[in-house]
Image: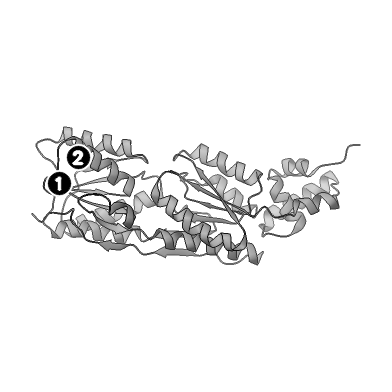
C-alpha cells in the first residue's frame, strides 16, 4: 500500500499543503476548526508524518507577499519600500504582485504565494468578498489588510481616515465658494472608494448642497479610465460645467489632469482640483495640488512591524485596526469664486 502523502491530507481537508504543515509543526496559529479538520483527516487516512520531510517543510522561506491593485501606482510602490525597510531587518524579502484590480487574478496570486510558502501576506484587496483571504486567515496564514477593509475577516487592518479627509477636502472647496463639485472616484466596491465618497457626500449635505448625479464619475483603477471619464463628463455638460473636481487618489488626479489639458482647461482658472495623493509625487504637477497627503511611510512601516510581530509570536492574539491620519496640504489648485 502506498504511503499517504501530506498533499493527500491537504486535498481531503480542502486546505493547502502549507496549512497541513502548520498543523504538524505547530509553528503558526491555525484556527481550532481547521486544526481539528486536518487532524481528523490525518486519522482517517492513517497518515504517518515523515520526520525528514517535516524538517524540510519547517524551513523558513523568509518571503513576505504583497498584493496590490496596481504595481505601477507610486502610492503602493512607496508602501512597499517602507515595508521592505522594516522586514529586511530580520532577513525577509518582499514579493510584490499586481492584481490589476481583478478579483480572480488576485485570488490566483494569493494561491501562488501560499503554494510558494510565503510566511505572511499583506494585501490591498480588490475583492469585496475576500473569500480566499478569509480562507487563508482561517488556515493560519498571517495576513494584514492594507488600505482597504473587508467585513468579516478577523485579521489586522491598516487604513487611512478616508471619510474625514474627504470631508475636509470637500469642505475646503465649499468654503472657497464652490457649489458645483464633481467627484471622480475609484471603485465603490472597495472600502476606500466608498468611505471617500461618503465623506464627500456628507460635506455637501452639511452645507446644504445637492449632489448632481452627472458630476459623479467612476474612474476605475487606471489613468486612462479617469481621463476618459472626465472627458465624457465635460462633453455632456458643456453648458453646466462643475467649478471644481474632487479626485479620490493620485491616479484619478493624473488622469483628470491629462483630460483637462487636452481639452484646454486650466487649473485653477477654469476648474479647481483637489485630491488624495502622495506628497512628493503631486509636488511635481504644476500648479501644485491641494491634497490629503497620504503617509505611505507610516502605512508601510506599520505593516512591516505587524508582520514581524505576528511571525515572532506564533500565537493567536487580538487583531487591531490601525488608522493613519492624512495631512491636508493647501497649495495652488483651488480658486476662490
x and y, in percent, of residue 94 in the image: 56, 52
Q: How many numbered marks appear?
A: 2
Q: Quadrant of the N terminus?
A: top right
Mark 1 burial class by Cα count in 10 Å: few <14, some 14-19, many 20+: some
Depth check: give the residue in front, 138 or 40: 138
- Position of 245 relative to 234 (above/below): below
Depth check: give the residue in front, 48 or 260: 260
**Residue 281 numbered mark, or none:** none
Location of residue 165 by image quarter: bottom left
- Position of 135 relative to 295 (above/below): above
Compare marks 2 and 1 and give the one earlier in the sequence. Answer: 2
Q: Is residue 324 left or right of residue 63?
A: left
In space, the residues marked 2 and 1 are separated at their CA atoms by 9 Å
Q: Is residue 141 left or right of residue 325?
A: right
Q: Which residue is denoted by mark 2 in the rendering?
A: 260
Q: Which residue is denoted by mark 1 in the rendering?
A: 271
Task: Residue at 22%, 33% (x, y): give it.
Answer: 232
Secondary element at image label 1: loop
x and y, in percent, of residue 72 in the image: 42, 43
Q: Are marks 2 and 1 in contact (CB under 8 Å)?
A: yes
Task: Residue at 50%, 58% (x, y): give it.
Answer: 83
Location of residue 70 by image quarter: top left
Amino acid at each position: 500500500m502506498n504511503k499517504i502523502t501530506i498533499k493527500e491530507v491537504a486535498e481531503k481537508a480542502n486546505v493547502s499543503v502549507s496549512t497541513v504543515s502548520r498543523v504538524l509543526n505547530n509553528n503558526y496559529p491555525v484556527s481550532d476548526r481547521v486544526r481539528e479538520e486536518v487532524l481528523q483527516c490525518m486519522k482517517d487516512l492513517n497518515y504517518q508524518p515523515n520526520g525528514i520531510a517535516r524538517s524540510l517543510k519547517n524551513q523558513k522561506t523568509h518571503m513576505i507577499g504583497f498584493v496590490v491593485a496596481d504595481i505601477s501606482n507610486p502610492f503602493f510602490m512607496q508602501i512597499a519600500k517602507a515595508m521592505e525597510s522594516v522586514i529586511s531587518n530580520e532577513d525577509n524579502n518582499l514579493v510584490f504582485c499586481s492584481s490589476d484590480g481583478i478579483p480572480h487574478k488576485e485570488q490566483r496570486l494569493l494561491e501562488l504565494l501560499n503554494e510558494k510558502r510565503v510566511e505572511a501576506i499583506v494585501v490591498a484587496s480588490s475583492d469585496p468578498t475576500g473569500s480566499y483571504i478569509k480562507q487563508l486567515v482561517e488556515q493560519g496564514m498571517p495576513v494584514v489588510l492594507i488600505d482597504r477593509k473587508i467585513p468579516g475577516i478577523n485579521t489586522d487592518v491598516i487604513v487611512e481616515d478616508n471619510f474625514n479627509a474627504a470631508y475636509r477636502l470637500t469642505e475646503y472647496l465649499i468654503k472657497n465658494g464652490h457649489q458645483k463639485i464633481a467627484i471622480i472616484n475609484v471603485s465603490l466596491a472597495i472600502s476606500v472608494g466608498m468611505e471617500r465618497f461618503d465623506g464627500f457626500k456628507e460635506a455637501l449635505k452639511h452645507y446644504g448642497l445637492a449632489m448632481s448625479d452627472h458630476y459623479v464619475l467612476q474612474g476605475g483603477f487606471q489613468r486612462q479610465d479617469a481621463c476618459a471619464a472626465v472627458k465624457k463628463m465635460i462633453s455632456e455638460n458643456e453648458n453646466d460645467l462643475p467649478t471644481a473636481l474632487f479626485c479620490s487618489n493620485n491616479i484619478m488626479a493624473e488622469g483628470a489632469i491629462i483630460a483637462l489639458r487636452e481639452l484646454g482647461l486650466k487649473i485653477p482658472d477654469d476648474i479647481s482640483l483637489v485630491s488624495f495623493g502622495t506628497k512628493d509625487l503631486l509636488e511635481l504637477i504644476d500648479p501644485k495640488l491641494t491634497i490629503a497627503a497620504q503617509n505611505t511611510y507610516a502605512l508601510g512601516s506599520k505593516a512591516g512591524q505587524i508582520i514581524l510581530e505576528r511571525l515572532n509570536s506564533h500565537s493567536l492574539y487580538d487583531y487591531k485596526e490601525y488608522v493613519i491620519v492624512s495631512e491636508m496640504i493647501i497649495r495652488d489648485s483651488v480658486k476662490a469664486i
